[in-house]
Image (tube, coloured by chain):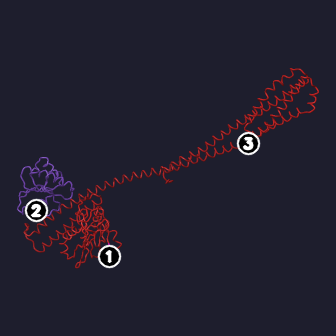
Amino acid sequence: MFKVNSYTSWIIIGTLLPIIAFSIVAGISFISLNNMIRDENWVTHTYMVIDKADYFMKTMVDAETGQRGYLITGQENFLAPYNSAIPLIDNQIAELRQLTSDNHVEQASMDKLEPLVKKRLALLDINVNLRRNNNTSGLVQNFDAGTGKQTMEEIRQIVDSMKNEEQQLLTKRILDTQSSVQTAGYVIIFGTLIAVILTIITTLVINKKLAERQKLERSNIELQVQSQELRDADIAKEEFTTMISHELKTPLVTISGYAEMLKEHDSILGPLNGEQIKAVEKISIETAKLERLIGDIMDAQKIDLERMKFNKKEFEVKEFLDEQIEIHSKLMNEKKIRFINTTKDTAVISSDQHRLSQVFANLIKNSVDFVPQNNGSIEINAQRKNGHVVFYVKDNGSGIPKEKQDSLFKKFYQVDTSLKRSHGGTGLGLVICKGIVEALGGKVWLESEVGKGTTIFFTMPRNGVNGNHAEK
Amino acid sequence: MKVLLIDDNESITEMMAKYLTGKGHECTVSNDGRNGLTLIEQEKFNVILLDLAMPEFTGVDVIEHLYKNGAISKHKIILFTASSITDEEIQKLIKKGAHSCLKKPIKLDVLLKTIGA
């Protein structure tokens, strides 16, 4: 369904392949660019988390430092860092949780961090209150327990591990990005290279195909010109043949006219003796032959140029063949040839009687030329078969060798030149028969055996014409 | 009968005139179409034998002329042709008023019958 060697499919392939290659390159470039932007965002994000974590730790330390100053001095102004740090812490925790919401490891750390922070802040609060009430023994007890220091240490560890986690993630992401950028680079370079090569190849191929096509178009035009020249030559040939035929026929008028006058019983040209009458007879016969030959040449030309005109009428084949017997009976009697119509079929066909008579005249004339001198026999017949009527002319003549049968229906051909000499003729008779029969929708063929005779068959379509009698 | 023979070929007109005179007809010969037409207009002929293919002024021209004059119906015109003209063209000429057409070479007995018909 898709012919690869055709010009159009090459154009389609040649256009599509580079487009596909360039599209892949463009797609990969787009994806890796997007990855780079995403990674850039991740870097920012990581630094934000680390910043927040550092800030949170600083706030915690501020709270602890403020508390410590107050515990030592008992002066309220030392409590300022503590007081400003406390309200910030909840917010910072919430921000850290939100920033790390995509990472379950960090979230788990946050889960551990939050109670520790609460615990530490609660202890700071207790210590501040103990100092305010001057409960020194309680404070000492608390310091001795070391809970505050320990909690703070845990908090510091968790925050460090969170920062560490973020740092590791960032390193991994940067490595991933580097490798994907590298891959994208290769794809872009090789993809572009392949696309360019494909474009060059397809352009070359299309150019070649285009050149072939242009060459074909040129030769097509040349052919058209040539065929026009041939048509012109045909017309010139036809005009020439018509002119020659006219020129040849004109002297025949005088020749045959005088011959006819000389042959007449009471000839106005005076009486002739027996030998002279025979000579004039010969002139008449040869003139008639010449006349027929000129007619043959004209007919062969008309068939050649498909100019022959037909006049179709319905007629019964049996009656038609009876007429043929009548037309040629005089000649057959003279030559003592047995000439019979063996048709029984009463089929009716619609065809050109005049042209079919011409076909029979040619076939019969051929047979007459080839049958033996004494017991010559010619049989004509018509019989319906399938949608056709098959006609034949059968003789007991010398027959035609197998290898020469095919060329019989070709122009200017007779079995051999010796026959041409002994029987005369242009060899156009069978060509004309074939042309007429085929123009009327039939076929011609022959069966022949050397020494036994020849039968020439031809068909005529019945064209839906029904016989007036039942088929036999 | 008074017969006018128009054909550019002198041997043909000579032969035919000899034959037809022998058969008791009175023949006038013209070897030129234009001259033939002048004769037709000057004299009354029973039959005109007219060759279609002639140089310069052809038989077809003669017919066209007589057809335009309206004089064609007054004459019995028998045409000759040697296949230089198609059957359709012949039919047109017969429609215009020519009597019939004989194809060359002409059988003299057929010619004689056509003249008498």
Camera-nearest residue between A221 and B14: A221
Which segment did they paint magenta? A447-452
Q: Residues within 10 Å of mark 2 (few under 14, many from 20)?
A: few
- The residue type indicated by label 3 comes to Leu
Residue type marked 2:
Lys
Please indicate whether residue B109 sits to the left or right of residue A460 in the image: left
Q: Amino acid type of disc 1?
A: Glu
The residue most toward the bottom is: A374
The residue under the point 84% across, 22% down is: A80
Pointer 2 residue: B113
**Which quadrant is home to the N terminus of chain B?**
bottom left
Quadrant of the rendering where the C terminus of chain B is positioned: bottom left
**Label 1: how many Cα within 10 Å (few below 14, some 14–19, many 20+):** some
- Checking the image for residue A449, the label placed there is 1
Q: Which mark is residue A324?
A: none
Q: Colour of chain A?
A: red
Circle 2 or circle 3, nearest the eye? 3
Distance CA(mark 2)–CA(mark 3) = 122 Å
**Proximity of marks 1 and 2: CB atoms separated by less than 8 Å:** no
Query: Which comes before the other along the chain, label 1 or label 3?
Result: 3
Figure quadrant of residue A301: bottom left
The residue depicted at 67 percent of the width and 40 percent of the height is A35
Residue hosting label 3: A175
In front: label 1 or label 3: 3
Q: Is label 1 in a helix, a strand or a loop?
A: strand
Please identify the quarter of the rendering in which residue A250 is found. Answer: bottom left
Question: Picture coordinates of residue A286 (x, y %)?
Answer: 19, 69
The residues tagged by marks 1 and 2 sit, at their Cα atoms, a distance apart of 48 Å
Image colour for chain B is purple
Which chain hosts label 3?
A
The answer, for residue B97, to whether it is visible in the render is yes
